[in-house]
Amino acid sequence: MQYNKMNDLDLAHKTVILRGDLNVPVQNGQVSDFTRIDRLKPTIDYLRAQNARIVVMSHFGRPKGTANPEFSLSFLTATLEARWGAPVAFASDCIGTIAEDAVGALHDGEILLLENLRFHGDEEKNDKGFAQQLAKLGDAYVNDAFSASHRAHASIAAITDFLPSGAGLLIQEELDNLNAILGNAERPMAAVVGGAKISTKLSLLSNLVKKVDYLILGGGMANTFLLARDIPVGKSLVEPDMVNEAQNIMAAADAHNCQIILPIDVSCAKEFAANVPNEIHSTSTIPADLMVLDVGGESINNVKEILQDCKTVIWNGPMGAFEIKPFDIGTNELAKTVAQLTQSGALKSVAGGGDTVAALDGTNSSKDFTYISTAGGAFLEWLEGKTLPGIAALLTNKKAA
Ligand code: AMP
């Protein structure tokens, strides 16, 4: 697959629109994981070395087409300055005169961050007119938002119709590594998928069961699978309207010889809060007045045994409500296990996704994984064998996509 790279474009002294993914995890108003920011730095450095004027744009959260200050990117400039080691100006809109004036004030090598793209509903509609307004701001376009490249949005796809375009260094690194490790993955292969809900990962789960030998489920989404097996889950986060889908996924897994592994025991509490008393219960006897907030020790031991038999594991989504203690234990223990097996040479491991990387950092184990992707959804969709819309838009022969 041949795609255009920024290194092939003439960017010296040009105004370059750089699509990053600055949708970083935030806790109490503070960035809780810098991975996406730090992994964009090589591209920033490259562009600064070219004396380019750098116009950074990104989405943040889901403001759904309205300028909701809660989702403003303005809070991020100080962090970007500290991590990138350069001043970062801010424009309070990503199109129109506000953005155009801010771009006009830039000098060679300077950086401007535009306000959240998703303040405009046209961004998620891949609207050509909106893309054209963005394109008006620069001479060239660089996509380095690998983790957003599974979305055909205006700043990812349509914009490439209007400017010379290429992939940044992060996208190149991600594709090189994912191809090398997972292009011809050694079996048995397991996918660990956690996180809050099935509904957001439905198509991924349906496809994963066709690709992997084990689908290990944790987090809130495992509750819906338990319910689909007629196991009551008390007051847990659960999606009763997804029970049918969960049953379909289980049937597809059977048909493709993929074993779905659900928690055997769980850590429960009365409320979703830090340091509340917790109780461990077998999944078959979850008390009606408690909610499941993490997987238990038996479940982790079970997963450890399965992973000892595997050659490749991919991981997206935490095993529990890892932000609040003691419900980080399941995720932390599993992270340590995968790290140890990787370091011993028994396993190749790839983890990805904002929350997942933040969760792994709790045990400082990310460095021991074979590869950490900045992407969650995008890397799972890449695994399905799809050409991501963001990459398709950069193909040297677009019509072949
Ligand atoms: P996602 O963005 O879908 O990967 O979900 C990550 C979120 O899932 C984290 O904020 C976790 O707190 C949350 N989560 C994981 N397990 C549970 C659970 N058992 N109950 C409630 N929330 C959970």
Image (spheres, rainbow, N blue to C red):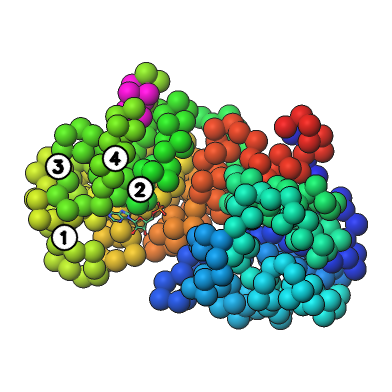
Q: Amino acid at mark 4?
A: Asp
CA gap, disc 1 and disc 4: 24 Å
Q: Nearer the viewer, mark 1 or mark 2?
A: 2
Which label number is shown at residue 37? none
Q: Ligand 1 appears in which quadrant? A: bottom left
Which residue has dot 3 on it? 232
Q: Main secondary structure of the magenta part?
A: helix
- Marks 3, 4: nearer the viewer: 4
Indicate which disc, 1 or 4, sits on the residue closer to the N terminus.
4
Q: Is residue 113 magenta?
A: no
How far is mark 1 from mark 3, CA to CA?
15 Å
Q: Residue at x 78, y 36 (%)?
A: 398
Give me the C-alpha separation between circle 1 and circle 2. Answer: 19 Å
Number of numbered discs overlaid on the protein picture: 4
List x then y, in percent, for residue 13. 90, 68
For the residue carrying disc 2, how many other residues have a C-alpha within 10 Å: few (<14), some (14-19), or many (20+)? some
Quadrant of the drawing holding the C terminus: top right
To which quarter of the image does residue 145 belong? bottom right
Mark 4 sits on what residue? 241
CB of mark 2 near ligand 1 (< 8 Å): yes
The residue that label 2 is drawn on is 197
Seen at 82% across and 70% down, the residue is: 53
Q: Secondary structure at mark 1?
A: strand
Residue on which the image places disc 1: 269
Which span of residues is magenta-colored? 249-254
Q: Amino acid at mark 2?
A: Lys
- Is residue 40 visible to the viewer in this orientation of the structure? no
Which amino acid lies under the numbered mark 1 shown in the image of this protein?
Ala
Quadrant where the image shows the N terminus: top right
Mark 4 residue crowding within 10 angstroms, few (<14) / some (14–19) / many (20+): few
Judged by depth in the image, the label closer to the viewer, 1 or 3, is: 3
